[in-house]
Image: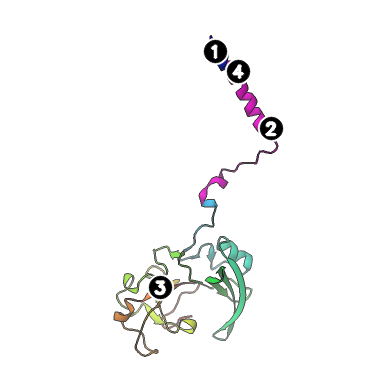
Amino acid sequence: MTVRLRARPMLLALPLFLAGCSSMPSMPHMSWSGLNPLNWFGSSLTVTDQGVGGITASTPLTETAIKDGLNGNYSLRSGMSMSDGKMLSFFQAMDGKDVKLSVSGEPKGNVQRVDVMDPEVASEWGVKIGTSFSDLYTKAFDSCVKGEGDDAQNVECKAPQSAHVTYVFSGIWHGPESLMPSDDALKDWKVSKIVWRANPLQTGQAQ
């Protein structure tokens, strides 16, 4: 009898408590998606044959489209440059003062090229900044070319799995600057940049 008398007030109080909670105006709306830790931070990007993150050959070269394609992970700053006598527009994806990616193309056109310098961004085949030449290639012939422009001291090699993706390798070479480093020297060079192009890199052409 004693147990029954004590239990009844508790059972009566429970519906009142729940009803009171549902009617409290100060209770915030709970979103289950907001509780997912994956939504607390911008999702990581991946370089694929189609592009980088959400950026592809059909992405307009606008700040809004690029920011969306990069999942809002970076702040952007824009500029203009010349390449082979052509005017190019570019956006640099910044993390503080560091440039992590560069997205470029013709003014008012679509994205033509993305240069990735962020160590957190890898290709879908597991290659990232710091990967050794010897992990991917046994020789440079038929896969690599001397870099041009800002990459004149480097070597650029086509990804084995994609005509749109290349890896820029940097390292030490004591031979003539005009010559491709030897395979023995290249084996210790590391990826310093991953490049995606809408138009595949042609042999003997680094832009």
Query: What amino acid is at disc 1?
Result: Arg
Q: Residues within 10 Å of mark 4 (few under 14, many from 20)?
A: few
Say which label, 2 or 1, has the lower sequence index: 1
Q: Amino acid at mark 4?
A: Pro
Q: For the residue labelled by badge 3, is the local secondary structure a helix, a strand or a loop?
A: strand
Visible in this render: residue 103?
A: yes
Confirm whether the magenta stretch covers residue 93.
no
Foreground tag (2 vs 4): 4
Answer with left or right where residue 10 lies relative to residue 118. right
The span from disc 1 to disc 3 (Cα, nearest Å) is 74 Å
SS label for mark 1? helix
Determine which residue is flagged by label 1: 4
Residue range (magenta): 8-37
Name the residue beneath numbered marker 3. Answer: 191
The percent position of residue 204, horizontal first and vertical second, equals 42, 83
Q: Position of residue 119 (x, y in %)?
A: 45, 67
Label whose residue precedes the other's in the sequence (1 or 3): 1
The residue tagged 4 is: 9
Residue 171 quadrant: bottom left
Q: Give the left or right position of residue 139, taking residue 157 as reference.
A: left
Q: CA distance from mark 3 to mark 2?
A: 59 Å
